[in-house]
Structure formats: C-alpha cells, structure tokens
C-alpha cells in the first residue's frame, strides 16, 4: 500500500494527466468527494482484478492486449451500474457528483493501478492494499501539485518559466525528494 501511495503516484509515473481534478481542486469539498469516489472505484476494481485477469487470459491469447481491454470494459460496467443506481436512488446527488464520478472512473490512475496489479500477480490482500494506496497516493499527488501551483502563482517567477515550465520543475524536485526519502540513491 505504501509503495503504491508513494512511488506510483508522487513520482507521477502514470497520474499527471488529471486536469479535471486540478480544475475542481480549489474547493476542498470537491477533493473530498473525488477522493471517496476514487477510493471506492479502486477498491472495487482491485477486488475484481483476479477474476478479470483469469477471464482476459481465457478469452485473449495475447495478455498485453486482452487485459487492458477487459479492464476498460469492466470499469465502464462498474461506472454504468453506479451511475444508474445513484440516478434511481437520488437523482439530486447524481447531478451533483456526475462529473466527479466520471473522473474517478475514467482516469489513468485507476487503469494504471489495475494493470500493475494484474501484471504483478498480487494476492487478494495485496491487491486491496495496492488499490487503497493507489487512491490515497493519487489524491495526495493532486494536493501536492495544487499547492505547488498556488505557491508558484504568488512567487516571483521569471517570465519565461511562468505556468507549466515552473510546475514541471517543481514536480521534478518533489519527485527527487520523494525518491531519496524512499532510500534510493541517484546514479553517480
């Protein structure tokens, strides 16, 4: 769980393309609701990981093409069931969280986390921990990026580095710091 929360997310190996949450992350309530939805989606997807891996290996001869396809279909079905259930039970709640639900279901962090779990052959408990850690790490990464954007906006940054270049430099420094905190050394 700690590995997924730190290395797989803070170093942004698969979760930098999270524009929707960047837009909504100015409001702490929206971060909290997306966090809950993403945690639920990663937990449900991690519970389905082992049976879906077996199904994709049965159906497709090439696992590198079959596993992602089966997982995308499964995530789409999970999204559809949750959306229909919420729309039937509480249409008002569904209207409030519809965009956040789609973000929580269709993002690189969820698919990346599930595919890593499938390829590593983790046990059921390890998959559950990896899913929870992946969700926690992704949200933590979004908060770190948002804080960096806020601090860059109030700092005196040279004109050439304003905006995305300064953010990329900031993310590189955060990644190096986390990488060193995990006990790794840079090559000499």
Image (cartoon, rainbow, N blue to C red):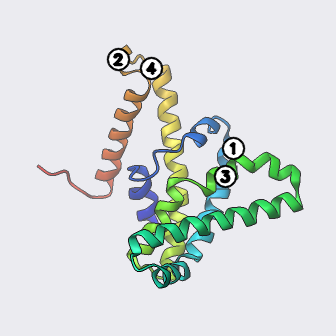
Q: Check if mark 2's residue and mark 3's residue have beta carbons within 8 Å.
A: no
- Distance Cα–Cα, label 2 vs label 3: 35 Å
Looking at the image, which is closer to me, 97 or 78?
78
- Distance Cα–Cα, label 4 vs label 2: 14 Å
Query: Please, is residue 60 above or below residue 184 in the view?
Result: below
Camera-side mark, 4 or 1: 1
Q: Whole-percent x and y of residue 98?
A: 74, 49
Q: Check if mark 4's residue and mark 3's residue have beta carbons within 8 Å.
A: no
Query: Please, is residue 26 above or below residue 59 in the view?
Result: above
State the residue at coordinates (67%, 67%): 77
- Residue 155 - label: 4
Q: Give the residue pinned by disc 3.
A: 102
- Residue 30 - label: 1
Q: Check if mark 1's residue and mark 2's residue have beta carbons within 8 Å.
A: no
Q: Secondary structure at mark 4?
A: loop
Q: Earlier in the sequence, mark 1 or mark 3?
A: 1
State the residue at coordinates (66%, 52%): 102
- Distance Cα–Cα, label 1 vs label 3: 13 Å
**Label 1: how many Cα within 10 Å (few below 14, some 14–19, many 20+):** some
């Amino acid at each position: 769980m700690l590995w997924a929360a730190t290395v797989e997310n803070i170093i942004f190996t698969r979760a930098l393309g999270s524009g929707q949450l960047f837009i909504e992350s100015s409001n702490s309530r929206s971060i909290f609701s997306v966090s809950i939805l993403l945690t639920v989606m990663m937990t449900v997807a991690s519970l389905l990981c082992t049976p879906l891996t077996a199904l994709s290996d049965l159906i497709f001869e090439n696992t590198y093409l079959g596993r992602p396809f089966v997982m995308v279909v499964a995530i789409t079905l999970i999204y559809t069931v949750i959306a229909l259930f919420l729309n039937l039970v509480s249409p008002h709640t569904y209207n409030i969280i519809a965009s956040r639900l789609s973000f929580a279901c269709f993002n690189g962090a969820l698919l990346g986390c599930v595919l890593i779990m499938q390829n590593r052959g983790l046990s059921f408990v390890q998959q559950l921990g990896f899913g929870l850690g992946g969700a926690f790490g992704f949200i933590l990464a979004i908060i770190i990026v948002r804080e960096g954007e806020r601090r860059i906006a109030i700092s005196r940054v040279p004109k050439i580095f304003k905006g995305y270049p300064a953010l990329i430099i900031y993310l590189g420094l955060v990644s190096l710091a986390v990488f060193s905190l995990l006990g790794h050394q840079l090559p000499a």
